[in-house]
Amino acid sequence: MRVVIAEDLFLLRDGLTRMLQAHGLEITAAVDNGADLLAAVAAQAPDVAIVDVRLPPTFTDEGIRAALAARNTAPGLPVLVLSQYVEQLYARELLASGSGGIGYLLKDRVFDSAQFVDAVRRVAGGGTAMDPEVIARLLARNTGNASIGALSPREREVLALMAEGRSNAAIAQRLVITERAVAKHTASIFGKLNLQPSDDDNRRVLAVLAYLEA
């Protein structure tokens, strides 16, 4: 798996590089600004980009802007945002692109290298990896719509755990229900959100997008 990293702090950038390489991932570029990220994506065609929201020169939104621009040149580019902050507006802009894997993790809530690498792989494979705090912040601004409003409380719990990237087995364990029950809830969610039969991984992403953008 080929990975591009955009992180301005040298120690974190170097640490991410070494950690991912130790898990067998190939780092094609590790840069500290948005312009170099765009150049690396164009030149290297990575499988996933790991991007900090705040990059030089203003340390406001250069990273996420560069990620969005990269998706314009490489449609469907999987992007995993790694930030110190929950940037609601920019998270929604990334989600609104609607294609490719998406992830948003908070730096101070990443405690395990194996779990982080799993999140990188999941996003690269077209899935989602959303920190629960990010989900909570986004949903706090949820204005609601008819489709999402039709979900039962349990279905909303299942969908929130889907957004974290959890499998049916992990959701079942978390909610103390059977995998068969999770499968039934998932099918109901897809039906209520009018997601037509297709690859289940794709429908899971679309369901999460509908949930977070509602």
Image (tube, rainbow, N blue to C red):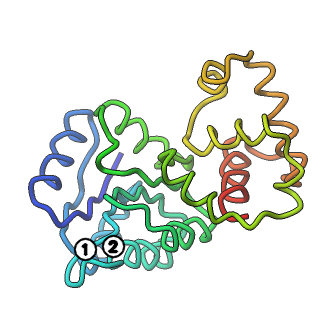
Which mark identifies residue 47? none
Q: Out of 120 and 46, give the one closest to the viewer.
A: 120
How far apart are labels 1 and 2 at the CA level?
5 Å
Q: Is 31 placed above or below 212 here? A: below
Where disc 1 sits, the SS reads loop
Q: Relative to residue 142, is residue 64 drawn left or right? A: left
Label 1: how many residues lie within 10 Å, few (<14), some (14-19) or many (20+)? many
List the residue tagged with mark 2. 63
Counting from the top left corner in percent of width and height, residue 37 is at 28, 72
Residue positioned 62% across, 18% down in the render: 173
Counting from the top left corner in percent of width and height, residue 39 is at 28, 77
Tag 1: residue type? Leu
Residue positioned 14% across, 62% down in the render: 9
Q: Out of 55 and 200, give the one closest to the viewer.
A: 55
Q: What number of labels is visible?
A: 2
Where disc 2 sits, the SS reads helix
Residue positioned 84% across, 52% down in the render: 195
Which mark identifies residue 55? 1
Q: Relative to residue 67, is residue 193 drawn left or right? A: right
Q: Relative to residue 82, is residue 190 drawn left or right? A: right
Dot 1 and dot 2 residues touching (CB under 8 Å):
yes
Q: Earlier in the sequence, mark 1 or mark 2?
A: 1
Q: Out of 160 and 200, give the one closest to the viewer.
A: 160
Residue positioned 62% across, 70% down in the render: 96
Q: Is 152 placed above or below 184 here? A: below
Q: Quadrant of the C terminus?
A: bottom right
Furthest residue to the left? Answer: 11
